[in-house]
Image (cartoon, rainbow, N blue to C red):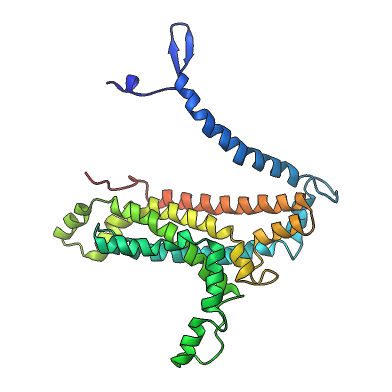
Amino acid sequence: MSAATSSAPVAERGERGWRFDARGWLVVPALAVLVAMFVYPFAYGLFLSFQPMDGGGIFANYLKFFTESTLWPTVWITLKLAVPATLINVGMSIPAAFALRRNTPAAKFVTMLLVVPVTLGTVLIADGMLTYYGPNGWFPQALHALHLYSDEVRLTHNYWGVLISLVISGFPFAFLLILSYVTGIDPTLARAAGTLGAGPWEQFRLIYLPLLVPGLTMAACLSFVQAFSVFPSAVLLGVPAGATRVVSIAAYEAAFESYDYSLASCVAIVMGFVQLLIVAGMLGARRAFYSGPTSGGKG
């Protein structure tokens, strides 16, 4: 079967012009969901952000966001949480994925344990951390009982509590994505390099790492977007009026405390724009670093 007959174009050119392929209707439900769940809310929020409740011009909300000391610092606070969480999640996922890439019962069992936090949710994780890492929790009491640390251990209601929560909830996603890329690389490539004298570090740096760049980039992008949109952890485990007042909290306060939905939409648009810039930067860095195949496919 030729390429022309094997493909299924939505429209085909016949003797009387373009003819619509009925199979094109299969994409209509997906397009309808995309428009209803993303395009329309985004367009409405963008339009609403240019309609300030107190007047002052169409850019009044954006001027207010970048001039008030209670709004613009939330971007920096969120970045201070999201960037380290992304680096930690991706950094820990690489050795874990290599250690568990073989299809053995033990590897399957450990993989199952590592992805358990996915089933818990951020609120349940936060509640468990309050019990375990709180001032009177098991972890501080164990440190004191073993005489490893004598001062007060504070890992909740501060920056560190939110960061730990982001790592616990975000690690499984990064690990599973990187694991899928690692298992997709043909191991004979590394073995061939080994026969030519390449050690484990050279094999990783020259073979695995270039082939893993697309997977590492996607895992970093998804992990960053998930961490940047933090909300429950920042409220339950942090200081929502201080050190962990992230962008999502500012949007929530504008919408449901001040009832200024226009300003809340502005905060959400800024939040999305910052995420877009970071993701675009990572994708651009990936192209500059490596532009070869996305995997070393087996077979």
x, y (%) of residue 60?
A: 80, 51
Numbered-mark total: 0
- Tell me the quarter of the picture where residue 80 sits: bottom right
x, y (%) of residue 92?
A: 39, 66
The N terminus lies in quadrant: top left
Query: Horizontally, is 272 left or right of 287 in the view?
Result: right
* Outermost right residue: 55
- Tell me the quarter of the picture where residue 93 sits: bottom left
Q: Which residue: 65% across, 59% down?
A: 248
Name the foreground residue: 207 vs 299. Answer: 299
Name the foreground residue: 293 vs 231. Answer: 231
The C terminus lies in quadrant: top left
Q: Which residue: 76% across, 50% down?
A: 261
Q: Is residue 249 above or below residue 281?
A: below
Q: Which residue: 65% across, 38% down?
A: 40
Q: Which residue: 21% across, 53% down?
A: 189
